[in-house]
C-alpha cells in the first residue's frame, strides 16, 4: 500500500491482521525495510493486533529524499494513521526506528497509546557517541565494503544466520547516498530535553551484546521519560527483534497487553 505525504513523498507500508485489533506500528532501523519485522509480523498478527509496518522515507520501496529528518518520519507515521482512520496506536521502534518513535511520542502525544524503544538512543552528545556515529558515516562514505564485512562479523552464520541473510539482502539494494543522509541525521539527533513530554507508558529494551556503551545510551533515554520501564535483553543487540526474537516478543507483548 502507498500514500503520498503532505510534502509529496511516496511512502510504502504494509498492514497485517484485523483492522479491529489493537493498532501497532513497527518502525525499522537504518538501511533496513519493513521486512526487518518478519518474525514479529508472523507472530503478532495472531495476537489480535492490527500491524502497520512502513518503509521509512529513503528506505525500501518508499521514495528517496534529498534531505532526511527524524521529525519528517514521525509526521509520516501520523499521516499513515490518518489515512487508515486510526486515532491512536502503539508505537514500537528499533535503533533508528526508536528515534522516530520518540519523536512521534513528543510531536503526537494524543496519537500514542504505548511506546516501545529498543536498541536505540535519545541523543548523540558525548565525544565517544559522536565519534562512533561519524566513523560509521565515514565508513559508508569511503569504505562501504568494511560495513559489509562488519555485518558478516556481527551476524555470523553460526550464530544468527537468518539475521545475516536479511542484512545481506537489505544492504545489497540500499542506496549509499540515502544511507549517508540518514546516518548524518542520526548523528545530530537530540531529543532528550523533550522526553519529559512523553505521556504514554513506555518500555525501553536494550540487548547486552554491545556492552556498556549501548546500555548507557538506553539508560539515559529511560531516565528521561517519566515512569519508563527498562529491561535488558540477555544476548540481544541491534536489532534485538531479530537476534533474540523470543525474549524481545515476550517483553513487548506483555507490555502492550498490560492494563495501565
Image: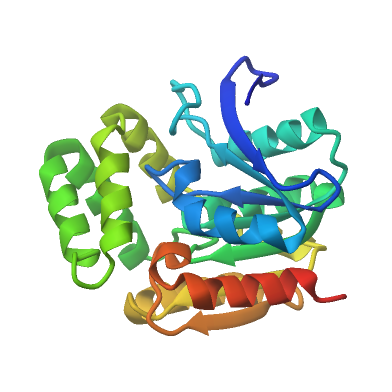
Say which residue appears at 78% left-offset and 28% top-offset.
Answer: 83
Please indicate whether residue 159 sits to the left or right of residue 223 in the image. Answer: left
Which quarter of the rendering shows the C terminus? bottom right
Task: Judge whether residue 131 can be spotted in this image.
Answer: no
Residue found farthest to the front: 46
Q: Position of residue 11 (x, y in %)?
A: 58, 26
Say which residue appears at 24% left-offset and 64% top-offset.
Answer: 155
Q: Position of residue 38 (x, y in %)?
A: 49, 52
Q: Position of residue 167 (x, y in %)?
A: 30, 49
Q: Quadrant of residue 46?
A: bottom right
Is the image coloured rainbow, by chain, by secondary structure, or in one colour? rainbow
Say which residue appears at 36% left-offset and 75% top-offset.
Answer: 213
Say which residue appears at 44% left-offset and 33% top-offset.
Answer: 59
Q: Position of residue 204 (x, y in %)?
A: 60, 72
Residue found farthest to the top: 8
Q: Quadrant of residue 149?
A: bottom left
Task: Judge whether residue 67 can be spotted in this image.
Answer: yes
Residue 177, placed above or below residue 248:
above
Q: Nearer the viewer, residue 89 or 48?
A: 48
Amino acid at each position: 500500500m502507498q500514500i503520498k505525504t503532505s510534502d509529496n513523498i511516496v511512502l510504502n507500508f504494509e498492514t497485517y491482521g484485523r483492522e479491529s485489533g489493537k493498532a501497532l506500528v513497527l518502525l525499522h532501523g537504518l538501511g533496513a525495510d519493513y521486512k526487518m519485522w518478519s518474525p514479529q509480523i508472523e507472530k503478532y498478527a495472531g495476537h489480535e493486533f492490527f500491524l502497520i509496518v512502513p518503509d521509512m522515507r529513503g528506505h525500501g520501496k518508499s521514495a528517496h529524499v534529498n534531505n532526511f529528518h527524524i521529525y519528517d518520519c514521525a509526521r509520516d507515521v501520523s499521516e499513515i494513521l490518518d489515512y487508515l482512520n486510526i486515532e491512536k496506536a502503539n508505537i514500537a521502534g528499533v535503533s533508528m526506528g526508536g528515534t522516530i518513535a520518540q519523536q512521534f511520542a513528543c510531536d503526537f502525544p494524543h496519537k500514542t497509546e504505548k511506546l516501545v524503544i529498543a536498541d536505540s538512543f535519545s541523543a548523540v552528545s558525548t565525544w565517544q557517541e559522536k565519534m562512533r556515529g561519524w566513523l560509521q558515516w565515514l565508513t559508508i562514505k569511503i569504505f562501504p565494503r568494511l560495513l559489509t564485512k562488519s555485518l558478516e562479523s556481527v551476524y555470523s552464520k553460526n550464530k544468527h544466520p537468518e539475521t545475516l541473510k536479511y542484512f545481506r539482502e537489505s544492504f545489497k539494494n540500499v542506496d549509499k547516498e540515502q544511507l549517508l543522509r540518514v546516518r548524518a541525521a542520526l548523528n545530530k539527533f537530540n531529543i532528550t530535553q523533550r522526553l519529559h513530554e512523553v505521556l504514554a507508558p513506555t518500555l525501553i529494551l536494550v540487548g547486552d551484546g554491545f556492552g556498556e556503551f549501548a546500555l548507557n545510551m538506553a539508560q539515559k533515554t529511560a531516565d528521561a521519560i517519566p515512569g519508563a520501564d527498562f529491561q535488558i535483553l540477555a544476548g540481544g543487540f541491534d536489532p534485538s527483534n531479530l537476534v533474540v526474537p523470543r525474549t524481545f516478543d515476550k517483553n513487548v507483548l506483555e507490555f502492550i497487553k498490560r492494563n495501565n
